[in-house]
Amino acid sequence: MVQQYVSDYWSQIQSPNSTAKPTRSLSEGLKDASPNVLAAHLAHEGTHVQWLRDGKGYNTEDEIVNAEYAALKNQADVWNAVKGAEIDEQCDEVATIMALGKDEAKDLIRLMYREEVRQRRKGW
């Protein structure tokens, strides 16, 4: 589930060198999601917007991993705060990854994003 989310995310990411305002979008698959799931995803995507507005880039592997860690952490924090008894496969998986701790979570993120990082490197 997270791997599909990774692919969807990279198909939408805006170049950090663009002069356009950073924008994010949510997957069509979330159209029937609960408000709790939407809140968690908006926290994630909002983190990416803020990342770009703060002038941080996606230009190196470490920047990509740090950006995604921040977004996933915010998603997990919101999800854990609002989910109650609700179950959502993707949000629960993100919360589980973040519960491993920063170092292990970043190691997993690095693995999940390996192919996307390779593709980005072609342009570096």
Image (cartoon, grey):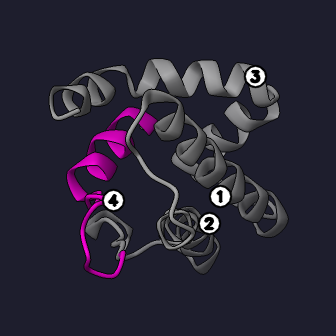
Q: Amino acid at mark 2?
A: Ala
Spatial separation of the CA atoms under disc 4 and disc 2: 24 Å
Q: Is residue 11 magenta?
A: yes
Point out the tag, 4 or 3, that comes first from the N-terminus.
4
Q: Secondary structure at mark 1?
A: helix
Which quadrant holds residue 113? top left
Dot 4 falls on a residue whose secondary structure is: loop
| Tag 3 residue | 103
Which numbered disc, 1 or 2, marks the residue that appears first in the sequence? Answer: 2
Q: Amino acid at mark 3?
A: Asp
Any mark on residue 75, and which?
A: 1
With respect to residue 48, does 10 lie above or below? Answer: above
Q: Earlier in the sequence, mark 4 or mark 1?
A: 4
Which stretch is magenta? 2-22
Contact? badges 1 and 2 (CB < 8 Å)? yes
User: For the point 58% across and 21% down, which residue is it?
Assistant: 108
- Whole-angstrom CA distance, mark 4 to mark 3, is 25 Å
The residue closer to the viewer here, 69 or 4, is: 69
Question: Which residue carries the number 2 mark?
Answer: 40
Residue position for label 4: 16
Kind of residue at disc 1: Gln
- In the displayed structure, 63 sits above or below 104; it is below
Mark 3 or mark 2: which comes first in sequence? 2
